[in-house]
Image (spheres, rainbow, N blue to C red):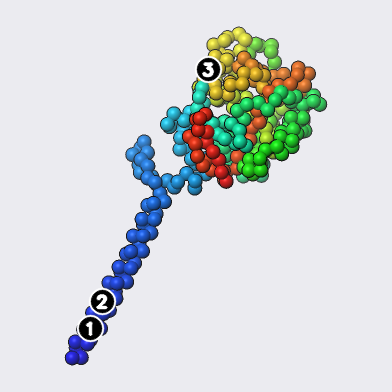
Amino acid sequence: MKNFINFLKTDIKIINSYFLFAIILIILISVGYTSYALFSFTKTSTNVIEGTVGDLSKSGTDALIKLTDNKDNSGLYTITHEADNTLQIGATESVTEYRYRGASPKNYVSFNNETWRILGIFPTDDGNGNIENRIKLIRNESIGNKYWDTSDSNNWARPSTLNTELNTTYLNSLTSEAQKMIGNTKYYLGGKNVTYNNGYADTPLQFYSYERKIQNTTSNEFYNGTNPNSWVGKLGLMYVSDYGYASSNCENKRIYDYNSSANDIRVCNDTNWLYNIKDNEWILPQNAGTSNRAFYVNSNGHVNYNFVVYNGQFAVRPVLYLTSSVKITGGNGTSSSPYTLGL
């Protein structure tokens, strides 16, 4: 009888062990099923299965970068600039950017209850040396014709009249949600000493370096006088390089060439999505050879420089960099279904 009771006790222990094991197994299955529900699995072009969380939990930069190399006809392409120790960014390692290019990329976005366009995703300095990938936007339409600077100076950081208006009156007119999405950014102020004498200027690829030069290598080559290398703020204008890279593989065309139409960037008008307002439009770089001229996009598509005040007012399309926390919450980037944003 004693042996039988001992057997029962042992059997109960075994039953309890099986019961505990069953409970643990149920918990593990539940956790696994929940994890599976949270993740969607997609097959990449390299036949590697990768788990990606729903778009609402991704940063906007990560969501867009997945579309590079024109995936799904996005119009987004990878651009790499080799390290250059004369530049303010990318001095010790190469810089990888993701730019929208061509006639009609899928880069429409709803921002401030308006239509804006995504220039791309760029390694961006917040002004304190913190560099991270951030989305760069440009308004699809002009906010009106304005002077670059009514005091006749091409020093954007002074600040210029246009700088002041964009970062006070215009910034304060945006919705509170839009304002929260804009981060401080180091804007590079380099330009070039350009003259009409030769009948041509350099290429957008070359201007990429000019815009970011650390300091002058010869007198007045990239900055006029004591003009600073950069300015930190929220709203600016696009660069010469932004305009040139928006076309399909035309960054090696000259921004203007009156001697050869084949080498002039105007031959790329039909494949440049930024050539859409077809108006004289201010951009950021200074003509370093003078104290009162800045670059602009001409209504016919080439890029040149002009007086910041004397020749009148030009169109203005504000540019900004979103904070890295901004997410893509909907849309597919087409004009009929622009991306929507959220924090």
Q: Relative to 53, is 338 on the left or the right?
A: right
Q: Is residue 146 visible?
A: yes
N-term mark: 2 or 1:
1
Which of the two discs, 2 and 3, labels the residue nearer the N terminus? 2
Q: Identify the residue at horizontal 55%, vertical 23% (top origin).
A: 273
In whole angstroms, how far apart are the C-alphas of marks 3 and 1? 88 Å
Q: Position of residue 198 (x, y in %)?
A: 66, 11
Q: Which mark is residue 270?
A: 3
Q: Position of residue 295 (x, y in %)?
A: 68, 22
The disc label shown at residue 335, or none: none
All told, the count of numbered labels is 3
Give the residue pinned by disc 2. 14
Can you name the residue that lies furthest to the right here?
A: 151
Residue at figure coordinates x 57%, y 31% from the top left: 117
**Amino acid type, label 3:** Asp
Q: The N terminus lies in which quarter of the figure? A: bottom left
Look at label 1 and name its amino acid: Leu
Label number found at residue 8: 1
Kind of residue indicated by mark 2: Ile
Secondary element type, mark 3: helix
Residue at x-position 26% and y-position 79%? 12
Which callout, 3 or 1, points at the residue further toward the start of the chain? 1
Judged from the image, the secondary structure of the residue bearing numbered disc 2 is helix
Residue 184 falls in which quadrant of the image? top right
Determine whether 126 is above or below 270 in the image.
below
